[in-house]
Image (cartoon, rainbow, N blue to C red):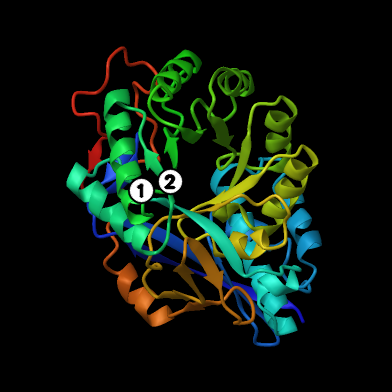
Amino acid sequence: MRITGYRTMVTEQHWGRPVGDANGVYADGVVPVPVVIVDTDEGISGVGLGPHVEIDRIFAAIEGEDPRAVASLYDRMLRHTFKAGHAGPVFGTIGALDTALWDIKAKAAGQPLWRLLGGRDRRIPAYASGLDIALTDDELAAAYQVYARHGLRAAKLKGGLDIDRDRDRLCLVRDVLTEAAYGRRPGLMLDVNEAWTRKQAVRHVSELERTLDLIWIEEPVRRWDTVGLAAVTRSVRASVATGENLSGLEQCRSIIAAGAVDIVQTAAVWGVTHFLRVATLAHAHDLPVSPVGNSPIGLLHAATCVPNHLTSELQDLTPPVGVSLDLHVEDGAFVLGDTPGLGIRVDDRTIRAAAQRIPAAPADGPHVRPERAGHRLVPDPDGTARLIPR
């Protein structure tokens, strides 16, 4: 079997409500989802959800190769980008191609990837994550009532702009989940997306902990601030979760070695091989791992075979337009199916029709760090992120 080519397309995630974080919000709730498909000479194709930046240069590392040599091909892609570096979307492109290769490998073996990787249990514990910073109280309660009906008993809220507002919203969601669980205490997490300085992080989390039991605070300071992350984790009761924006095992190694992280995260778009390697590194330090992302299908399969998986992020309960997934959510867990490969089916016609309606990417949004991030003496007037119209 040989790799013969690739195809790319972009579809959409339709949330039906505003979504975003401390850095910005998409008012229409429409988020682009890039797709990469790798083809072979035996008619088996693999799907990866992720960027395709500089894909011609990266694909040259795997073209004509046997796609089943996934780990070796992953290292070849890293070597093809080492001069300019493999950060950001370039690392995401490597991850998307890597995920597609794992899909091919499992399809060729006639097995779901979770089984091929050695997983025993197809159920992956999940927590609710609504990208919810722009929601009113009523909207927030309604959103988490839906998660609760699917058995979710832990929730991660977006915040970081107004600590009083964060406390009120966390308490609201706590009450929603407690009622759904007949009085059982739910798990609560807060993600501030690098919005604070070190001192702000310690001060704000300590204030929240007077009335709330937080499982973790996510990205309290900048992702590369090893000293700052270590200071926060030493100063608060909550665990520090970070790692989703670290591109490369070498970046994860430094924060783990410094004792700067309690829960090691990896982004879905970084690929299966990266997750497996980070999970092994974290396991050697007795740390749990937790995948993040809206469609973390590849990492869900991989999570079944690592001993230190804690929980995986569940964002939207519906897949992107034109994409179907062989999984469902029940009793607070993702449940993977038996379809060979990742269980992803792509409807090219539906996606291409949707692509004609995708608006131009805004110049601002959750992907753009605000000018005053980490430099506010008092909260923003409304305690919400910038609303980005389309």
Q: Nearer the viewer, residue 221 or 122?
A: 122
Residue at the (25%, 49%) spot, across then down: 141
Residue at the (46%, 61%) spot, across then down: 34
Residue 334 visible here: yes
List x then y, in percent, for residue 171: 31, 36
Q: Earlier in the sequence, mark 2 or mark 1?
A: 1
Q: Is residue 343 shown left or right of residue 193?
A: right
Q: Nearer the viewer, residue 238 or 178?
A: 178
List x then y, in percent, for residue 352: 37, 75
List x then y, in percent, for residue 208: 39, 25
- Residue 13 versus residue 44 in the image, above or below: above
Tell me how far mark 2 sits from mark 1, CA to CA: 6 Å
Residue 52 visible here: no
Which quarter of the figure is the N terminus placed in? bottom right
Q: Residues within 10 Å of mark 2 (few under 14, many from 20)?
A: many
Kind of residue at disc 1 = Thr
**Residue extending furthest toward the front:** 183
Residue linked to disc 2: 186
Q: Which mark is residue 178?
A: 1
Q: Is residue 363 shown left or right of residue 301?
A: left
List x then y, in percent, for residue 265: 59, 44
Instruction: Check contact, mark 2 vs mark 1: CB within 8 A.
Output: yes
- Residue 236 versus residue 180 in the image, above or below: above
Residue at the (52%, 65%) spot, across then down: 334
